[in-house]
């Protein structure tokens, strides 16, 4: 089975972006209307500003032009993941421990598939989330999506 274009681009771009001092959080690639769009979301422990996005965009654009992995003309967009940053990797759950998160699960945990609470930690392939009424343990394999809840929306 061949890898998807997204997988190929992630494998190609992640090390390059890390060498620039940033983390590849997410990548999307697809057609919007008549145009192909490659969106790169980057992060840094000190946050992301416009100059960071410009730096990565220029460097990555030159790199991708040389590597030529995309057979079509496309638009490259580089931005921060935003206040509601997705949590995808184990290290994300470690880094953002203590923050309020929203988790959507594949299978219900108890009777819920949507859980909002404070991320207490990760251990043995499970995250611990403290909701208003209980501690919930969610297997990483059961997570459909997880995101930070913006600080101004911390009520849960």
Image (tube, helix red, strand yellow):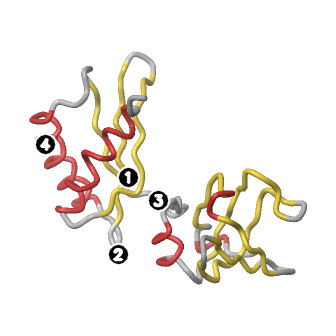
Residue located beneath label 4 in the image: 63
Q: Tell me the number on the disc at residue 41.
A: 1
Q: Quadrant of the C terminus?
A: bottom right
Q: CA distance from mark 2 to mark 4?
A: 24 Å
Q: Which of the two discs, 2 and 4, sits closer to the camera?
A: 4
Residue located beneath label 2 in the image: 45
Residue located beneath label 3 in the image: 82
Q: CA distance from mark 1 to mark 3?
A: 9 Å
Q: Is residue 82 left or right of residue 155?
A: left
Element under label 1?
A: strand
Q: Is residue 96 left or right of residue 128?
A: left
Callout 4: 10 Å neighbours few (<14), some, many (20+)? some
Q: Is residue 50 left or right of residue 111?
A: left
Residue sitting at 38 percent across and 40 percent down? 7
Q: Is residue 114 left or right of residue 54?
A: right
**In front here: 53 or 60?**
60
Quick check: marks 4 and 3 in contact, CB under 8 Å? no
Q: Which of the two discs, 4 and 3, sits closer to the camera?
A: 4
Quick check: marks 1 and 3 in contact, CB under 8 Å? no
Callout 2: 10 Å neighbours few (<14), some, many (20+)? few
Circle nearer the N terminus (3, 2)? 2
Q: Which of the two discs, 3 and 2, sits closer to the camera?
A: 2
Callout 3: 10 Å neighbours few (<14), some, many (20+)? some
Residue 1, x across and y down, in percent: 43, 29
Residue sitting at 42 percent across and 40 percent down? 28
Circle nearer the N terminus (2, 4)? 2
**In front here: 128 or 130?**
128
Q: CA distance from mark 1 to mark 2?
A: 14 Å
Element under label 2?
A: loop
Circle nearer the N terminus (1, 3)? 1
Callout 1: 10 Å neighbours few (<14), some, many (20+)? many
Instruction: Tell me which corner region of the image, top left, top right, bottom left or bottom right, holds residue 145.
Output: bottom right
């Amino acid at each position: 089975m061949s890898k998807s274009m997204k997988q190929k681009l992630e494998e190609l771009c992640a090390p390059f972006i890390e060498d620039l001092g940033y983390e590849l959080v997410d990548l999307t690639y697809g057609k919007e209307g008549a145009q192909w769009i490659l969106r790169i979301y980057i992060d840094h422990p000190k946050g992301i500003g416009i100059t960071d996005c410009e730096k990565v965009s220029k460097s990555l654009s030159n790199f991708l032009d040389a590597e030529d992995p995309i057979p079509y003309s496309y638009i490259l967009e580089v931005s921060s993941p935003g206040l509601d940053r997705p949590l995808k990797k184990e290290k994300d759950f470690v880094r953002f421990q203590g923050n309020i998160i929203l988790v959507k699960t594949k299978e219900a945990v108890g009777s819920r598939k949507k859980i909002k609470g404070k991320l207490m930690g990760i251990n043995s392939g499970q995250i611990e989330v403290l909701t208003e009424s209980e501690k919930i343990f969610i297997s990483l394999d059961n997570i459909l999506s997880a995101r930070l809840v913006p600080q101004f929306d911390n009520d849960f």
